[in-house]
Amino acid sequence: MTTERERRFPGPRRGQVVFGLLLVGTAVWLLGLIGTQTRWVDKTALFAQPRFWPAVGLGVMAVCAGLHLWRLPWRRLTRFDRAEALKWLSALEYVGWFLAYVWLVPIAGYLPVTMVFLPALTWRLGYRDRRWLVLSVALAVAIVVLFKAFLSVRIPGAAAYEYLPDAMRSFFILNF
C-alpha cells in the first residue's frame, strides 16, 4: 500500500533507488581508493594538497547521494527500477561497438574499418534504406580524408599493410 508521501512525489519513480545506490557505492568505492590514487605532500597548505579537493568532491558526492536516498519516499526496488536499469545498461552496447572499432583499426586500417563500422551502426540504428547506407560509406570516406589529408592526424598504419608490396605499403600507411 502506498503512503501519502509516495503518492504526492512529483518526480519520476523509476530508477531513483538504483541511481542513489549506484552513486553512493561509486563514491564510497572511490573514497576507498583515494589513498592509492593521490598523495599527501609534506609542508604544503591544506587547500593545495593533491588529495584535498578530490576528497572533498567525493565526500560531497557520497553525502548528496545518501541524502537523495534518505529523502526518497520509498526504498523498495520495483519492476520499474529494473526496467530503467536495463535501459541504462543498453547504452553499454555502443561502448562495445567503440571498443571493437578501436581494437580493429590497428589491425585492418582506419579507412576499411571506418567504411565497415559506419554502415553497420547506421543499420543498427534502424536506417536500413540503401540511400542511408551509401551516405554512411560516403561519410566514412569523407571523415578519413578530412582527418588524414586536411587535419594531418597521424594514425598508425595497420598490421594488414605489412603484407602489401613496398610501394603500396607506404602509400596505404600515409593515406589510409
Image: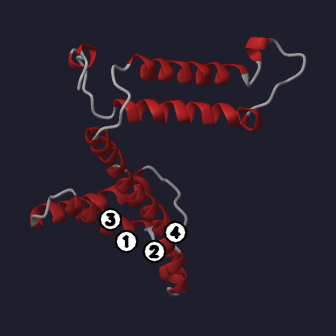
For label 1, the residue is 112
Q: Which residue is under mark 4?
A: 106
Name which residue type carries label 1: Pro
Which residue is denoted by mark 3 in the rendering?
117
Q: Is residue 68 left or right of residue 90?
A: right
The C terminus lies in quadrant: bottom left
- What amino acid type is highlighted by mark number 2? Ala
Q: What residue is pinned by disc 2?
A: 108
Residue at 90%, 16% (x, y): give it.
43
Question: x and y percent of residue 135 in the render?
Answer: 18, 60
Q: Are marks 3 and 1 in contact (CB under 8 Å)?
A: no
- At a point 47% along the width and 17% down the height, the residue shown is 67
Crowd class of label 4 (few under 14; some 14 to 19; many from 20; radius 10 Å): some
Whole-percent x, y for residue 153 in the image: 49, 53
Mark toward the start of the polypeptide (4 vs 3):
4
Q: Is residue 3 above or below residue 37?
A: above
- Mark 2 or 3: in front is 3
In the rendered view, tell whether residue 34 sits above or below residue 64.
below
Cα–Cα gap, marks 2 and 4: 6 Å
